[in-house]
Amino acid sequence: MYSEISYTSDDGLRLYARDYPAASGPARLPVICIHGLTRNSADFEDVAPSIAAQGRRVIAVDVRGRGNSDYDAQPDRYTPMVYANDVVKLAHDLGIERAVFIGTSMGGLITMTLALRKPALVAAAVLNDVGPTLSERGLSRIRSYTGKGEQFTSWQQAADYISGINAVAFPGNTPQEWERWARRAFREEQDGTLAMRYDPNIAVPIRANKLRSTSMAAHFAFRRLARRRPTMLIRGALSDLIEPAQANAMRAAAPRMLYAEVPDVGHAPMLSEPAAQEALRNFLASVD
């Protein structure tokens, strides 16, 4: 269903991405999917095939320090600007000059950074439950579990852990869905231990207070993106990171930005929900 890409960042790390080929048909802009803070490319394994079936090549990245990408020996490089540079390198290596970006949470911040770093690359953008101002309530929850280095000895334990930190956002998830999530989020070590599929040191910049609720730079990047490129905000109706006040402020700052709300989920929609699928399908149909 997908092929695996390995490429080298400008500072020498081996980085990974999944490449879903486009279905046959007229040439359309490719889509680059970027995951959230503690997540990886597997988060898009449901939505990516759906987009590819619409005739678009889909690249889902593992940001450095996550999934199958190398961990960085210098944790202070775990920043949106460095991540954006890695995406620019990937696009260059693949010969992609313009793409539609789908960014979940941190992936949306990276997309906003790309609008400054390499604006010609960003043809359109979907910001999945993220924006230039974030709710402190959601940030506190994310800080509480990031970088703890959790390890477990069974998939049931891992699923219970994932449920414990995410049930507030996905109250309707079944036990099977929590286990599937755990299998995306954890890897099995040689001794059978299950470890999170990210470098715990991604929390170093967070502890240095670099995960802030807002900044002038974030607002400038958002306006640069949403006023110059087709942009859509997808928000989970139960989100504690993009609450109604933040979403309304974004819509006021960028009146042409499209908006879709996914019922019964919080931060962040998986994008496989029917409401998200419909919003993505309509948005993508308008960007070529």
Image (cartoon, rainbow, N blue to C red):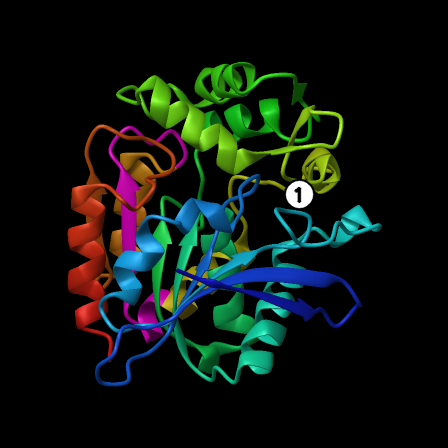
Up-down: is 122 above or below 218? below
The magenta stretch spans residue 180: no
Question: For the point 26% across and 21% down, which residue is it?
Answer: 172
Residue range (magenta): 226-241
Closer to us: 116 or 68: 68
Return the x and y of residue 6 as percentages of the image width and height: 64, 66
- Please identify the quadrant where the C terminus is shown: bottom left
Return the x and y of residue 275 as percentages of the image width and height: 17, 44
- Please identify the quadrant where the N terminus is shown: bottom left
- Residue type, numbered disc 1: Lys
Q: Quadrant of residue 135?
A: top left
Neighbours of disc 1 within 10 Å: few (<14), some (14-19), many (20+): few
Up-down: is 65 above or below 17? above
Q: Which residue was labeled with disc 1?
A: 210
> Is residue 124 in sight in this rendering?
yes
> Considering the numbered disc 1 on the image, is that residue within a helix, a strand or a loop?
loop
Return the x and y of residue 256 as percentages of the image width and height: 21, 65
Return the x and y of residue 97 as percentages of the image width and height: 47, 84
